[in-house]
Amino acid sequence: MTAGRRSLRELIAAPHPDVAPLPPAARHESGTRVLRGVPFAERAGSRPLELDLWLPGNTEREEALPLVLFVHGGAWLRGRRDDMGLRTRDWAPGPFARIAAAGIAVACVDYRLSGEAPFPAPLDDLRAALRWLGLRAAELGLDVGRTVVWGESAGGHLSSLLALTQRAGPAPVAAVVWYGPADLTTARGPYDPQSSTTPEALLLGGAPAACPDRAWEASPLAHAHPGAPPFLLVHGEEDTMVACSHSRDLAARLDELGASVHLRTVPGADHGWYGLAAGQVEDIFDQSLRFTRRFTQRGAGER
C-alpha cells in the first residue's frame, strides 16, 4: 500500500464522533427540538456511546445556550439515557422538553454499565461527553462553560463525582443530585460492603470491603473540597434503596469545607420519589430547574 493512503478498513469505518456530521434537529411535539442518538465516543470492544440533545424551539437565538448534562440511574447496571426516573415517565411534556423550553439545552448521555466495564469507566465516559460537547459547541450553539450536571440514583453518584473531580476541560458549574450514593465504603440501610453481589460490588469489580481503596476513590464523599461547585442534594427520608444518610453526610462535609450546598430531605419519599403525590414530585423538579437556571445565568460564577 502506498504510504499515506488509508486502508480499506479505515475507509469503510463510520466517521469518528469528533468529525462525524451532526444529524438535523427534529421538531418535538412539545415545540422543542431534539437530536437523537448522536455518537460522542468510541470504546474498544464496546458499543458506541451516544447522547440525545434537547434544544429550545427558538432557532434564532444569538446567545449560546447553557447546558444540563443528564446522567441516568439504574444501579450502574441498567437504565436508559432518556429516563429521569419512575415518576417522570408519564409527563407530557417530559422533563427534558421542560428544561429545553426554559432555555437550557439538555444532553442525555450514555455511559458504560457495570457489565461492560468497571469503575472508573462510567466516569471517564461522562468526561468524554463533556469534552465532545465542548469540541462541537460552536456547531451546536452551546456554552459548555455554563454546564450543570444533573443525575438520579446511580446517575446522581456519577454526577457528584464528575462535579467534584473534573479538573481539565469543561467542568460543571453546579450539580443537582437526586438520591445518589455518596459513600461506597460503609454499611448503610440495606447496603453491605462485604457482599460481592451488590450493584456497588459489580461497579467496582469486587466486594467494596475487599477493595477499600477503590471503593473510597469511587465515593463522592472522598472528593469533597472547598472549591466544589454548588450542590443541590434532594433525597427521600424513607429511601429503602439508598439511605438518606448518603446525602446528609455529603452535605455536611461540603458545608464543613465551606462549599455551597443545599440539602432537601423529603418526608414520606422512597427511592425514585415513590410514595409522593404528583404535585410533590413536580415541586422537586421545579426547585431543581430553578437551581439550574440560577447557576447557568451569565455571571453566576462571579457572585
Image (cartoon, helix red, strand yellow):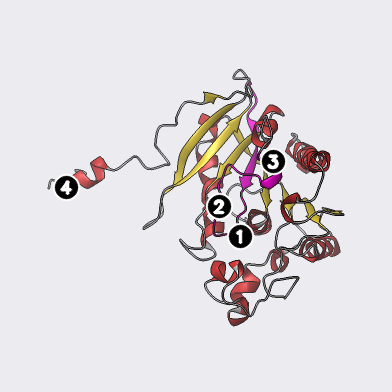
Instruction: Give the residue at mark 1.
Output: 75
Badge number at residue 127: 2
Mark 3 or mark 4, whichever is nearer to me: 3
Element under disc 2: helix
Nearer the N terminus, badge 4 or badge 1? 4
Would residue 80 be counted in the magenta stretch? yes
Element under disc 3: helix
Quarter of the view holding residue 218: bottom right
Nearer the N terminus, badge 4 or badge 2? 4
As measured in the structure, the alpha-carbon distance from the residue carrying label 3 to the one carrying label 4 is: 55 Å
Whether residue 26 is situated above or below residue 12 in the rendered picture: above
Left or right: 111, with 157 as reference point: left
User: For mark 1, does the 10 Å Cα neighbourhood hold few (<14), some (14 to 19), or many (20 or more) residues?
Assistant: many
Element under disc 1: loop
Instruction: Give the residue at mark 3.
Output: 88
**Residue at position x 29%, y 43% in the image:** 13
Query: From the image, which quarter does the C terminus lie in?
Result: top right
